[in-house]
Amino acid sequence: MISSTILKIDTKGNGQILDLTPQVSQVIAQKKSDEATVFLSVIGSTAGLTTIEYEPGLVNHDMKAAFEKIAPEHDRYVHEETWHDDNGHSHVRASLLGPSLHVPVMDGRLVLGTWQQIILIDFDTRPRSREIVCQILS
């Protein structure tokens, strides 16, 4: 059986990192899912999902610094020349991170490490209203 929910999240963009773990846990509790897999997918091409230890060093510095090295904001992007916008780096970063994530559920709880949280990174250059599809497969 598949149960679907859309999580709506307002973001500030520019690499903002948000902890989605509480919202996903709430969906699992509402659906009374004991043994399942949660599939998450962010709609759009300038945001991504992963897990990290949601702590200030990673959230406020390390993740942003790593992505700046991989896809620098002020490099030349043909995307920007083609569409006359400023978010070529956002598309590259989101593509490298990926839009989706699977997390197991056992005994009605997400199976995550002690310091592991589900996060959304919005790489776009402006605030956005994001939708994350949350499907529980049981």
Image (cartoon, rainbow, N blue to C red):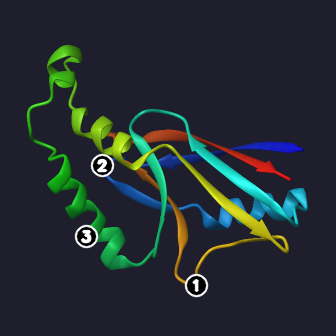
Name the residue furthest top.
82
Q: Is any atom of residue 123 visible in this view?
A: no
Which quadrant of the structure image shows residue 35?
A: bottom right
Q: Is residue 55 left or right of residue 116?
A: left
Amino acid at pointer 2: Asn
The mark that comes first in sequence, 1 or 2, is: 2
Q: CA distance from mark 1 to mark 2?
A: 28 Å
Q: Nearer the viewer, residue 83 or 2?
A: 2
Q: Residue at x 45, y 39 (%)?
A: 128
Secondary structure under the numbered disc 3 in the rendered image? helix
Residue 44: percent from left, percent from top:
48, 33
Q: Is residue 116 left or right of residue 24?
A: left
Q: Which residue is mark 1?
A: 114
List the residue tagged with mark 2.
14
Relative height, residue 91 to residue 27 (above, below): above
Which residue is under mark 3? Answer: 61
Taking depth in this image into account, of 63 and 14 the one nearest to the observer is: 63
Left or right: residue 111 compared with residue 83 = right
Residue at the spot 56% in from the left edge and 48% down from the top edge: 9
Q: Are marks 2 and 3 in contact (CB under 8 Å)?
A: no
Q: Which amino acid lies under the numbered mark 1 shown in the image of this protein? A: Thr
**Where's residue 83, x and y in %?**
23, 16
Q: Residues within 10 Å of mark 3 (few under 14, many from 20)?
A: few
Compared with 90, 86 (above or below) is above
Q: First in sequence: mark 2 or mark 3?
A: 2
Q: Quadrant of the N terminus?
A: top right
Amino acid at the residue labelled 3 = His
Residue occupying image coordinates x 80% and y 49%: 137
